[in-house]
């Protein structure tokens, strides 16, 4: 990284010193009031004194209480002076977003992510035209005397020469200067319609004939939505309309996730600290059952993890479910507090879960009985869990995907101060990704064809096939041939990624 960039970051992080506290602090006042009842005892002659253990306990308790109270007064998250504002910090300056939230061009859900934290990395990584966005930000009210030092610092993406160069080339060469008209948020409508169309067919098949195959079909649809439609929608990248993006983002709630929790843990944690072993909460790891980091203690069974990990991957969807409920109760995901989440956003968690459970379990149980509903639900969760877990493991954990030069999982380079590292380089290094669209497409075709063949075992359908064997069986044969070709192509395209992933899982299980 150039010296110029480093010096820029240091100067940008420079903040005024915190003003000195009054001569008599709150701690001193509470200590004095706590000790006063025991001053009379201390003035007695030594021979007349009795040990007074409660006095010591009272003093210690008063000290702890005063420390907590004084910290609370300094904290902008609990100080009434700052609670009246929807505040954020950008490059060491605190701004009031209250009047701007409803006027934000991308909608209030995205700008809510910036409330109550240093939004520098979020702001600079989201806007393709930083000068235009910065001018709008500087028009907002500045909060004087705000305790900026109490806010955890954020990376400064615009100080990265690599990031600035890539962004300008993308604007010029990919969007050809049309990003001002929303070119970077259009063009995916066809893909969204295809994915949602398949999900609708899979859901109808599941409700019509709940079972193992249809549950797996719907699970693939859920994984596909989770990796595409809801992902782009919650990023605000599916459409120029905030309402469309919100609707697409809410599909995450329908498949069993939570759009609210996803926005915080994925955008606030993952995108800002991409694949950072310490700060990226999107990195999948199931230690102690699976060891995906060489710094973790190694157990004897980890040398077999490349074999038994497939039995743990189906549980990922269940882990997400439990994590969403826990996050709602605690108002935070792992490592990220939901400072800006409003009541409607929190309500989507509950409403989405109820609708999801109704589609996956309640309606099938009413239509086909509890055994069929249980089998279909298990197939749905297992299929979605395997696809998502395998995707995250490849894209987040293999050494080639780590944002470090040496490729070693034990490196501590990411723990250096932000001024000493290039945020753009850190973001650009992770590049491993399995060919999931091909995998899901071919798997869906196989399972859909299998379900149709199984349904043909029904007597009425067999009679129909016999009456029109040329019109039905010939298309079936064509579908089988196409399906086999697609599967062969998919296996070839996936062989490199999956072979490397299995090799890495084996080595990390053996490494001391």
Image (cartoon, grey):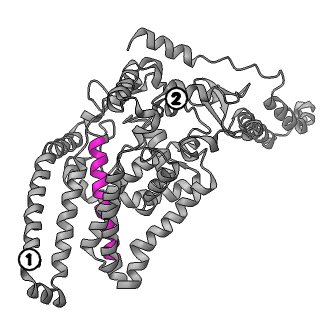
Secondary structure under the numbered disc 1 in the rendered image: helix
Viewer-nearest of discs 2 and 1: 1
Q: Which residue is mark 1?
A: 473
Q: CA distance from mark 2 to mark 1?
A: 61 Å
Image position of 210 with respect to 2: above or below: below
Q: Foreground: 203 or 302?
A: 203
Image position of 233 with respect to 405: above or below: below
Query: In the figure, is residue 99 to the left or right of 274?
Result: right
- Residue 154, numbered label: 2
Secondary structure under the numbered disc 2 in the rendered image: loop
Which segment did they paint magenta? 374-395
- Which quarter of the figure has residue 345? bottom right
Q: How many numbered discs?
A: 2
Q: Residue at x 10, y 84 (%)?
A: 468
| Residue 457 horizontal/vertical position (percent) | 15, 84
Residue 403 in sight: no
> Does the magenta stretch mainly form a helix, a strand or a loop?
helix
């Amino acid at each position: 990284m150039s010296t110029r960039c480093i010096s820029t970051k240091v100067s940008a992080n420079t903040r005024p010193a915190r003003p000195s506290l009054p001569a008599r602090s709150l701690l001193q006042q509470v200590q004095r009031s706590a000790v006063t009842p025991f001053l009379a005892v201390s003035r007695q002659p030594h021979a007349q004194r009795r040990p007074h253990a409660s006095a010591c306990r009272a003093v210690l308790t008063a000290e702890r209480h005063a420390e907590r109270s004084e910290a609370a007064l300094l904290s902008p998250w609990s100080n009434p002076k700052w609670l009246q504002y929807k505040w954020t910090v950008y490059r060491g300056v605190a701004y009031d977003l209250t009047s701007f939230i409803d006027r934000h061009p991308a909608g209030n859900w995205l700008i809510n992510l910036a409330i109550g934290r240093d939004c520098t990395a979020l702001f600079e990584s989201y806007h393709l035209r930083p000068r235009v966005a910065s001018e709008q930000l500087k028009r907002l009210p500045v909060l004087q005397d705000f305790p900026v030092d109490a806010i955890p610092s954020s990376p400064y993406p615009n100080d990265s020469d690599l990031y600035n160069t890539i962004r300008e080339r993308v604007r010029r060469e990919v969007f050809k200067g049309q990003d001002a008209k929303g070119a970077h948020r259009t063009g995916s409508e066809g893909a969204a319609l295809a994915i949602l169309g398949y999900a609708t067919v899979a859901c109808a098949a599941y409700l019509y004939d709940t079972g193992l195959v249809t549950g797996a079909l719907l699970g693939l649809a859920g994984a596909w939505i989770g990796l595409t439609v809801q992902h782009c929608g919650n990023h605000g990248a599916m459409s120029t309309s905030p309402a469309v993006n919100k609707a697409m983002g809410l599909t995450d709630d329908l498949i069993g996730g939570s759009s609210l929790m996803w926005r915080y843990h994925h955008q606030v944690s993952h995108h800002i600290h991409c694949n950072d072993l310490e700060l990226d909460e999107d990195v999948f790891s199931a230690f102690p059952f699976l060891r995906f980091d060489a710094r973790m203690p190694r157990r004897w069974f980890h040398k077999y993890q490349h074999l038994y990990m497939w039995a743990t991957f189906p549980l990922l969807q269940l882990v997400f479910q439990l994590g969403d409920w826990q996050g709602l109760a605690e108002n935070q995901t792992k490592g990220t507090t939901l400072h800006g989440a409003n009541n409607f956003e929190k309500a989507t968690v509950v409403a989405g879960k109820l609708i999801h459970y109704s589609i996956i379990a309640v309606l099938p149980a009413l239509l086909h009985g509890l055994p069929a509903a249980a089998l279909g639900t298990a197939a749905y969760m297992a299929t979605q869990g395997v696809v998502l877990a395998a995707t995250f493991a490849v894209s987040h954990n293999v050494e080639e995907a780590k944002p470090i030069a040496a490729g070693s999982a034990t490196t501590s380079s990411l723990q250096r101060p932000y001024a000493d590292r290039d945020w753009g380089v850190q973001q650009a290094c992770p590049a491993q990704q399995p060919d999931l669209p091909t995998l899901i497409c071919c798997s869906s075709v196989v399972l859909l064809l299998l379900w149709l063949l199984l349904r043909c075992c029904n007597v009425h359908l067999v009679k129909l096939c016999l009456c029109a064997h040329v019109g039905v069986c010939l298309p079936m044969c064509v579908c089988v041939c196409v399906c086999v070709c697609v599967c062969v192509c998919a296996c070839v395209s996936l062989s490199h990624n999956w072979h490397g992933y299995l090799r890495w899982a084996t080595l990390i299980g053996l490494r001391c």
